[in-house]
Amino acid sequence: MINPMDILKLKGMWQQFRDAHPKLVAFAKAVRNGYVKEGSVFDLTVTDPEGNSIRTNFRLSESDLELFRQLAELVRGSSSN
């Protein structure tokens, strides 16, 4: 069972994140609207302040997409309460 107070805390933290990173949120919306399908490859790089970086990539499977769909449903369901 999800604690409603935890959801409210996360909602506030999400709002701060969205405000601080509007380009990432816009990117995620574009991806959600048709770019992501089975077989899509995510290529991620993280660079620290000293310039060191680490990179990985992964190909999405149907089960990955189902996980994303279920999480989206959970989020939509909690925001309508």
Image (cartoon, helix red, strand yellow):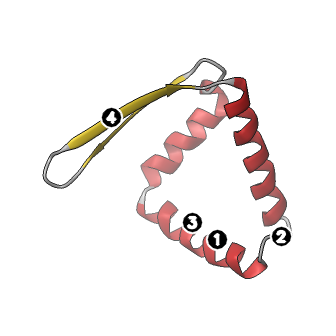
Residue 42 seen in the current view: no
Distance of mark 1 from mark 4, alpha carbons?
29 Å
Q: Residue at x 18, y 55 (%)?
A: 49
- Image disc number at residue 66: none
| Quarter placement of the N terminus | bottom right
User: Are the two marked residues, 1 and 4, in contact with CB atoms closer than 8 angstroms?
Assistant: no
- Image disc number at residue 1: 2
User: Are the two marked residues, 2 and 4, in contact with CB atoms closer than 8 angstroms?
Assistant: no
Residue under circle 1? 11
Distance of mark 1 from mark 3, alpha carbons?
5 Å
Question: Hey, which quadrant is residue 10 in on the image?
Answer: bottom right
How far from the left and from the top, in percent, is residue 53? 23, 41
Residue under circle 3? 14
Residue 55 seen in the current view: yes
User: The disc labelled 4 sits on which kind of residue?
Assistant: Arg
- Which sits earlier in the primary sequence, circle 2 or circle 4? 2
Residue under circle 4? 55
- Foreground of the two, 10 or 3: 3
- Foreground of the two, 28 or 44: 44
